[in-house]
Amino acid sequence: MNNCSIKLNVLRRLYEDKLFTEFDRACSGGDRSGLYFELYERGAENDLLKELCKMILLDDNAFSRTCARGDTPSAYLSDAYADDLNAIFGAASVLEGDEHFNTGGAIPPFDGELDGERSAANLTDYYAAHGCGQFIVYKAFAYENGKLMPIADTSAITLDELKNYESEKKQIFDNIVNFIGGLPYANMLLYGDRGTGKSSTVHAMLNRFFDDGLRIIELSKENILCVPHIRRLVADNPLKFMIFIDDLSLGEYDDKISTLKAGLEGSVCGSSDNIMIVATSNRRHIVKESFSDRENSVHPGDSMAEQLSLSDRFGLTVMFSPTDRQNYLSITEQLADDRGLTTDRETLMALAERWAILKGGRSPRRAKQFIDFAYACEQRGMQINF
């Protein structure tokens, strides 16, 4: 780090990137082969400037964090940040004749002239609207060891790919619109049979509203006790976060119940809150209870009320009902149309019914699995047979 010729104060973490250190070496007259290697590895042969701007944009530093909180950076911090930008852009000018340096490669919110003061002003507004660091790029995060770790490979499913269940999707859609728009919204419990599309709907909503500032934090039920810490981690972030707990069920005496209840308190929130808790479950009452528990309770009515109170704290409860035959075949036919299957529909529907019987029941998941199988058969010129 100390050997770098480009002296930085705010953006010092850029030194940790191999591309930047090779860039620094090349700008000071050193061998450029290491720089070219790093560009080739990233598939950015003639986009050095774009890669530099991307590194600056995504860097987590005092300036970006201050702007993301909605605060105005001090004059000292703003000037130091602009000086760093000018140092990088000035060094880059040495490479302007290099074929790997595309002068049209800058990305928003940088401008073509690459002026440090103007870029710093543009970035102030950008961070305030889009957050900073990893939150700009990644849609989903997992909570691990006290940190939010980005999830690179997220489901690409869209709302158009989820067939039927229109009323259920509309309730969720409208609630998220309120959440993003700063209107009163509710934490959500989505419950119903396996394979009815609860989790897929959540991920489709994330994809739909990512550009509007929606992100998701996937939380295992083992980490429910960490909900208050997650709130603190994103409290100053301008983005909106769904804490997503998939397949939630808890035992009657689980110590996580009280923490989750506290997290759900005041489930209709105002515009100052950027957290929504979303859980899916196969059961409406997510606290498991046995008959022996009820029989052994001194006050069985109080015990029952306590167990139901957790579910009741979700302001919006959406039931994904079991998929009957008509609904199942409707979903199957729509998916077949999307895939462009050529098998006549009567034959295809009969095969879909047989598939559901053999696989253990009807559901949107079963319909998709069948259509995927049928599509593969058609593409290979084979008869759909199982």
Image (tube, helix red, strand yellow):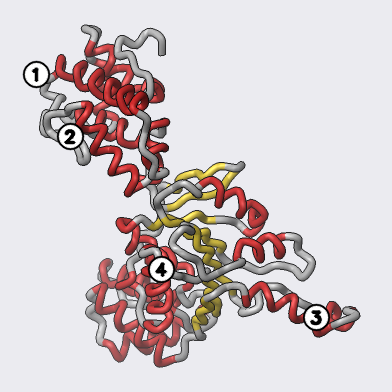
Q: Which quarter of the image is occupied by the C terminus?
A: bottom left
Task: Give above or below for 12 relative to 209.
Answer: above
SS category of the residue bearing label 2: loop
Task: Give above or below for 58 relative to 200.
Answer: above
**Cβ–Cβ below 8 Å for labels 3 and 2?**
no
Q: Toward the viewer: 173 or 349?
A: 173
For image coordinates 52% across by 69% down, the residue present is: 187
List x then y, in percent, for residue 81: 32, 26
- Disc 4 to disc 1, C-alpha distance: 52 Å
SS category of the residue bearing label 1: loop
Q: Which of marks 3 and 2 is nearer the N terminus?
A: 2
Any mark on residue 183, and which? 4
**Cβ–Cβ below 8 Å for labels 3 and 1?**
no
Regarding residue 137, the answer to whether it shows in the image is: no
Any mark on residue 106, and which? 2
Q: Which amino acid does label 3 sit on?
A: Asp
Q: Which amino acid does label 1 sit on?
A: Gly
Badge 4 crowding class, 10 Å Cα cut-off, few under 14, some 14 to 19, many 20 or more, is some
Report the mark closest to the observer, 4 or 1.
Answer: 4
Determine which quarter of the picture holds residue 248: bottom right
> What residue sits right under mark 1 in the picture?
97
Q: What residue type is labelled 2?
A: Ala
